[in-house]
Amino acid sequence: MRVIAGSYRSRILTSPPGTATRPTSDRLRETLFNILGTRVQGSRFADLFAGTGAVGIEAISRGAAHTFFAEKAPAALKSLKTNLSHLQITRNYTLEDRGTTPLLARLLKLEPVDLIFLDPPYEDEDAYTQTLGFLGSPAHASILAPDALILAEHGTKGSQPLPGYGQLTRIRVYKQGDTTVSFYTQLTTDD
């Protein structure tokens, strides 16, 4: 596993042994960041259920202004911290080691986020429902910038995230092998 592009291009990232952590593949990260294009530069990016931090580190490498990581699994958290340390990334990021829910609570009090990537364990349907439901709630709309994008990685087989959650609506689905990414944005209402 490596950083695909940007200031840390080709640098190797570590992953914990075993299958408990499933990093987003290099190929999929490359495709997703090509889709996002210039939106990443200067963005406020959140990597929820970050695992090794590969997606958030890719955002940093491509010029995100600030990246938020949320991870609480000990082995994954150790890899994430190791990756940040080995790349000598010391600023413009926040690491919430208590997981996604505490980070979302913190984000309610901060400037809005432009891009959110979430990749919980594929079988954890509640994590998708709770996280996307939280982000789609009108009471939590302040977390998202007006044109924010939320990318939810999930398995191609089995249960899928819904087409919408509150004010979030799915606008695109990208499939690559056994992995699918659903893109969501906020519904806008004309006054």
Image: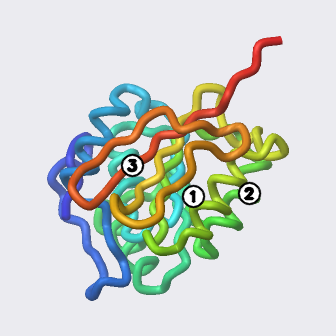
Side (left or right) of 58 relative to 114:
left
Look at the numbered discs 1 and 2 and tell me whether their residues touch, using CB distance below 8 Å. yes
Label 2, secondary structure: give it: helix
Among all residues in the image, which is located at the extreme left? Answer: 10
Amino acid type, mark 2: Arg
Side (left or right) of 97 relative to 107:
left
Q: Which colour scheme is used?
A: rainbow
Please name the residue that numbered disc 1 is placed on.
94
Side (left or right) of 7 relative to 191:
left
Please name the residue that numbered disc 3 is placed on.
181
Quadrant (top left/top right/bottom left/bottom right) for the C terminus: top right
Please name the residue that numbered disc 2 is placed on.
106
Report the disc number at residue 172: none
Amino acid type, mark 3: Val
At x 35% / y 52%, what residue is drawn?
Answer: 180
Among all residues in the image, which is located at the extreme top? Answer: 191
The image quarter in which residue 5 lies: top left
* Mark 1 crowdedness (10 Å alpha carbons): few <14, some 14-19, many ≥20: some
